[in-house]
Image (tube, rainbow, N blue to C red):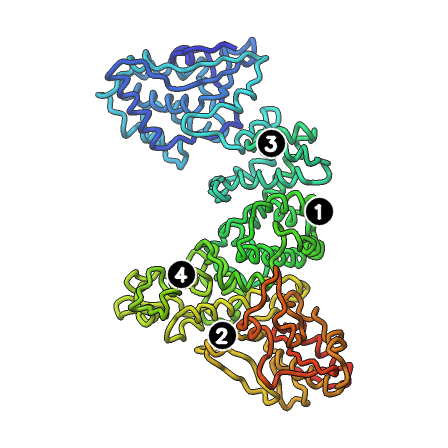
C-alpha cells in the first residue's frame, strides 16, 4: 500500500483506467454539494492556494498484455468526487476552448474512457464524456442534473483551468493486489454522504464474479426502478432514531436469523450482536459465525424483503383504516405509535404462517397486548427481547401459543398484560403523549363506528388532538367550585376522557373559550360540532351543555368500557364482528333494558354514576317469556339468575357461584360474577379498595336487583356481560327446561 498527496495528473495520467465497481452506489451528490464544489474551484482560481478535494483509494488490477491500457485500477473510494470533477472539467475545458486538454485526461487510446462508471450511471456518464459539444442531458438521474448545473453556472471569468489543475490535491491511497480493500472500504465514507448498511452489505455479498446473482435476485427487490429505490430510502422513526426503510428491514431480518433456533445461538453469542451498534458489522459476524452460504442468504433475505414491502408499511397512516383486526391496525401501532420493535416477530409470522385467519388472530392478540400496555404506560424496555428472542426463539406461529405465552407472564410486571382494573384507572388518570392518545382514540373510533356509518373515517394523519377543557382554562369561563381542586382539574384535562379527535385544529380563540363557544363556534370560526361531527367517540361530548371533571370521568369510563372489550384476546376465536361495543346516546348514557318490561332507562351522565352496560353490534336480545318481551344481555342475565333462584331457593351462595362461575366474566372478574354485600368492599389488586363509583358501574345496585341465597346472604349480579357470558347463562337456564328465545 502506498499513501500520500496526489495531484490530478497523478490520478488521471492518460494511460490509466479507473473502474468504479458495479456494487458501489450511484451518483448521489445534490445541489448543495455542487454549489460548494464550484465555490471552492472559484476560490482556488482567485487565490491560487492548494485545495484538498478528499481521499481517493485505488487498487491495482491485473491487465492483459494485449491491452492498450497500461494501468487499470478499481476505485474503492472517491467515485463521487472524481465524477463531479470530470463533469466540471468537461464544461470548463469546452467553454474555454481547451477541449483537447479534457480529452487527454479522460479519453484513452481506442476511445476508451479513463473512468468506467458503475452500472447505474454508465450510460449517462459515457454520453456526457463523448459529447463533441456542450448540450444538456435530459434525465432524472442526479449525474445528469449535476452536469446541467455546471452548464448553467460555470463562469469562465471566475475560473482558471491551469490554476485549478495545479492546486487541487487528493489524499491518495494505492493498494496492491494483496491488500484487503474490504477492510478499508468498510470504514471510508464519501464526503458528506455516509455509506449505508445496504450499500456496504451489497458490496460484501457481490463481486464481478457474482453479478448475475445480483441482477437476478438483489436488484429486482431493492433497485428495480425509481419507485423501489425511493421506497427503501424513505425514513422510518424508531424511537429516537430515524432509519431508512432498508435499514429497518435489514435490522429486523437479522433479529429473526439470530433468534432462529436453527442456528443455536446461546445468550452469550446473542449479546455479542447487541453490543455492536454497527448493523453491517453484525451481518459480517453472523455470516462468519454461521458459515452460511451467501447465495442461500440472499435467497432468504430477498424473500423476506418482498414480504416486508408488501405488508409492513407506514402508508396506513395516510389511509383509512379497516375495523377488522389485522395488519392495517398493527401497522398503525408500529409506525404511528412507535412500536417498531414488533417488526421482527411480525415479519417472521408473515413469512412462516400461511393461514390468513391465524395471522389475523395473532394480530388481534398483539394489538390488545400493546394497546393495554400503552394506555397503562407500561415500560417498553423489554419489547425487543420479547418480540425477537422469546417469540421468534420459541417459534410461536399460532394465536393460541402466543396467547398462552403472554398469559404466562401475568406475574411479570415488565411483560404482563394489564387487566381491566388497571385499565380503568389508566383511562381516568393517565397522561399520554399526544400521538399515543390520538392512537388510542383513533383505534377505538375505528372499532366503535358502524360499518354503515354515513361519514367515512379519515386517515390517522388527518386528525388532530384537542383538549375539550382547555389547558389554558380561565376560571371565569370554566368555573371551579373549590380552589383546592385546581391541581386535580389540571390533571384531568390531560387524560383520555378530555381528549378529542378533530378533522381540523380549532382556532386558539375558540379552543380556549367557554364551552358553548368551543362547542358551537362564534359564527366566523367553527367549533367542535363542525370538526368532530361523524365521530362516534364524540357523540356524548357534542350533546353536553357543559363540561367538567365529572363529564370527563364519565366519558373516560365509556371509552374504557369499549376498550376492555376491543382489546381483549380471551375470545379470540370469535369473529371480529361479534365483539361487544358500548354506545352513548345523545345526552345520556344508555343503561339498558330494565325489569321484565323491556323498557329502556336513560339517565344523565352525572346520575348514572358512570354506570354502563354492553350493547352489541349484532343487537342480540333475549326473551324469557316466549318472545313477548326481549331483554338486553345484562337484564337477561339478571332476570335469568332470579328465575333460577326461584326454582332453587335452598341453594347457598357458594352453590350458586359454582353454577354462575366467575369465569363467565372472562378477563373482567372484578369481585366476582355474583358478589356478596360484604365482598363489595373487598380489596382489589395491591390492596386497593374499589370506590363507590366503581361498584355502581360493575354491579346492579338498584334495590330491586338485590337477591338472597338459601343461606340468607344478600348479593348482587355483575353488569359486565359479554355475548359469550349471556350465551353461557342461556345454556344453564335451558338445562333447567327454561325456554330462551333470541332476536336481533
Up the image or down, 46 lies above or below 365; here it is above
- Tell me which residue sits at (40%, 17%) in the image: 106
Residue 24: where, in percent of width, then height? Answer: 51, 27
Q: CA distance from mark 2 to mark 1?
A: 43 Å
Residue 173, label in figure: none
Q: Name which of mark 3 and mark 1 comes first in the sequence.
A: 3
Q: Is there CB contact under 8 Å for labels 4 and 2? A: no
**Residue topped by disc 3:** 282
Q: CA distance from mark 1 to mark 4?
A: 49 Å
Q: Name which of mark 1 and mark 4 comes first in the sequence.
A: 1
Classify residue 572 as left or right of residue 523.
Answer: right
Up the image or down, 556 lies above or below 49; here it is below
For label 3, the SS is helix
- Tell me which residue sits at (24%, 21%) in the image: 156
**Residue topped by disc 4:** 487
Up the image or down, 320 lies above or below 281; here it is below
**Residue topped by disc 2:** 584
Q: Is there CB contact under 8 Å for labels 1 and 4? A: no
Q: Is there CB contact under 8 Å for labels 3 and 2? A: no
**Residue topped by disc 1:** 395
Classify residue 575 as left or right of residue 440.
Answer: right
Q: Name which of mark 3 and mark 4 comes first in the sequence.
A: 3
Q: CA distance from mark 4 to mark 2?
A: 29 Å
Residue 528: where, in percent of width, then height? Answer: 36, 68
Q: Name which of mark 2 and mark 1 comes first in the sequence.
A: 1
Instruction: For marks 4 and 2, give the one nearer the viewer.
Output: 4
- Tell me which residue sits at (66%, 79%) in the image: 715
Amino acid at each position: 500500500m502506498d499513501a500520500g498527496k496526489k495531484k490530478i495528473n497523478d490520478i488521471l495520467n492518460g494511460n490509466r483506467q479507473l473502474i468504479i465497481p458495479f456494487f458501489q452506489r450511484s451518483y448521489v451528490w445534490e445541489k448543495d454539494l455542487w454549489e460548494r464544489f464550484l465555490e471552492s474551484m472559484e476560490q482556488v482560481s482567485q487565490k491560487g492556494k492548494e485545495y484538498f478535494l478528499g481521499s481517493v483509494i485505488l487498487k491495482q488490477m491485473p491487465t492483459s498484455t494485449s491491452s492498450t491500457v497500461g494501468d487499470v485500477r478499481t476505485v474503492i473510494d472517491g467515485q463521487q468526487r472524481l465524477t463531479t470533477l470530470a463533469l466540471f472539467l468537461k464544461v470548463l475545458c469546452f467553454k474555454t476552448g481547451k477541449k483537447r486538454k479534457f480529452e487527454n485526461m479522460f479519453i484513452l487510446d481506442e476511445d476508451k474512457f479513463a473512468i468506467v462508471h458503475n452500472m447505474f450511471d454508465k450510460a449517462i456518464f459515457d454520453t456526457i464524456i463523448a459529447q463533441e459539444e456542450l448540450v444538456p442531458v435530459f434525465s432524472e438521474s442526479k449525474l445528469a442534473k449535476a452536469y446541467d448545473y455546471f452548464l448553467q453556472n460555470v463562469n469562465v471569468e471566475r475560473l482558471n483551468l491551469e490554476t485549478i489543475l495545479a492546486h487541487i490535491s487528493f489524499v491518495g491511497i494505492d493498494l496492491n493486489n494483496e491488500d484487503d480493500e474490504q477492510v478499508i472500504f468498510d470504514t471510508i465514507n464519501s464526503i458528506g454522504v455516509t455509506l449505508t448498511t445496504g450499500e456496504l452489505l451489497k458490496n460484501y455479498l457481490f463481486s464481478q464474479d457474482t453479478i448475475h446473482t445480483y441482477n437476478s435476485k438483489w436488484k429486482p427487490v431493492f433497485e428495480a426502478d425509481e419507485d423501489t429505490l425511493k421506497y427503501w430510502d424513505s425514513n422510518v422513526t424508531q424511537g429516537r432514531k430515524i432509519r431508512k426503510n432498508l435499514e429497518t428491514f435489514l435490522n429486523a431480518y437479522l433479529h429473526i436469523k439470530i433468534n432462529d433456533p436453527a442456528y443455536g445461538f446461546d445468550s452469550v453469542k446473542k449479546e455479542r450482536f447487541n453490543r455492536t451498534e454497527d448493523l453491517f458489522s453484525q451481518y459480517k459476524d453472523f455470516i462468519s459465525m454461521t458459515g452460511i452460504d451467501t447465495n442461500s442468504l440472499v435467497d432468504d433475505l430477498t424473500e423476506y424483503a418482498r414480504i416486508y414491502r408488501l405488508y409492513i408499511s407506514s402508508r396506513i397512516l395516510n389511509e383509512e383504516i379497516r375495523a377488522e383486526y389485522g395488519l392495517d391496525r398493527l401497522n398503525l401501532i408500529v409506525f404511528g405509535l412507535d412500536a417498531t420493535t414488533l417488526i421482527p416477530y411480525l415479519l417472521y409470522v408473515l413469512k412462516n404462517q400461511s393461514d390468513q385467519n391465524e395471522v389475523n388472530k395473532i394480530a388481534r392478540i398483539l394489538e390488545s397486548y400493546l394497546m393495554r400496555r400503552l394506555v397503562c404506560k407500561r415500560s417498553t424496555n423489554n419489547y425487543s427481547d420479547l418480540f425477537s428472542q422469546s417469540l421468534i426463539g420459541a417459534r410461536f406461529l399460532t394465536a393460541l401459543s402466543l396467547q398462552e405465552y403472554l398469559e404466562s407472564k401475568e406475574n411479570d410486571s415488565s411483560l404482563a398484560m394489564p387487566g381491566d382494573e388497571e385499565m380503568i384507572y389508566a383511562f381516568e388518570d393517565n397522561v399520554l403523549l399526544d400521538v399515543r392518545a390520538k392512537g388510542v382514540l383513533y383505534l377505538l373510533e375505528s372499532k366503535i363506528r358502524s360499518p354503515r356509518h354515513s361519514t367515512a373515517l379519515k386517515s390517522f394523519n388527518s386528525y388532530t388532538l384537542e383538549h375539550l377543557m382547555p389547558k389554558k382554562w380561565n376560571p371565569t369561563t370554566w368555573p371551579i367550585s373549590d380552589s383546592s381542586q385546581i391541581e386535580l382539574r389540571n390533571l384531568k384535562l390531560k387524560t383520555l376522557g378530555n381528549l378529542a379527535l378533530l378533522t381540523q385544529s380549532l382556532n386558539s380563540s375558540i379552543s380556549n373559550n367557554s364551552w358553548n363557544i368551543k362547542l358551537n363556534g362564534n359564527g366566523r370560526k367553527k367549533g367542535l360540532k363542525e370538526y368532530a361531527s361523524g365521530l362516534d367517540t364524540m357523540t356524548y361530548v357534542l350533546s353536553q351543555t357543559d363540561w367538567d371533571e365529572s363529564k370527563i370521568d364519565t366519558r373516560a369510563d365509556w371509552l374504557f368500557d369499549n376498550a376492555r372489550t376491543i382489546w381483549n384476546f380471551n375470545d379470540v376465536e370469535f369473529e371480529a364482528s361479534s365483539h361487544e361495543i358500548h354506545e352513548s346516546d345523545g345526552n345520556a348514557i344508555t343503561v339498558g333494558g330494565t325489569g321484565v318490561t323491556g323498557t329502556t332507562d336513560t339517565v344523565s351522565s352525572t346520575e348514572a354514576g358512570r354506570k354502563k352496560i354492553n350493547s352489541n353490534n349484532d343487537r342480540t336480545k333475549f326473551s324469557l317469556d316466549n318472545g313477548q318481551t326481549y331483554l338486553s344481555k345484562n337484564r337477561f342475565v339478571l332476570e335469568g339468575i332470579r328465575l333460577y333462584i326461584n326454582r332453587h331457593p335452598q341453594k347457598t351462595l357458594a352453590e350458586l357461584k359454582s353454577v354462575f362461575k366467575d369465569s363467565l366474566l372472562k378477563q373482567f372478574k372484578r369481585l366476582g360474577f355474583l358478589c356478596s354485600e360484604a365482598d363489595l368492599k373487598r380489596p382489589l389488586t395491591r390492596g386497593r379498595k374499589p370506590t363507590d363509583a366503581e361498584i355502581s358501574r360493575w354491579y346492579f345496585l338498584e334495590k330491586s336487583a338485590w337477591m338472597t341465597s338459601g343461606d340468607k346472604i344478600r348479593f348482587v349480579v355483575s353488569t359486565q356481560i359479554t355475548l359469550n357470558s349471556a350465551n353461557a347463562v342461556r345454556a344453564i337456564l335451558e338445562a333447567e327446561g327454561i325456554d330462551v328465545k333470541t332476536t336481533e
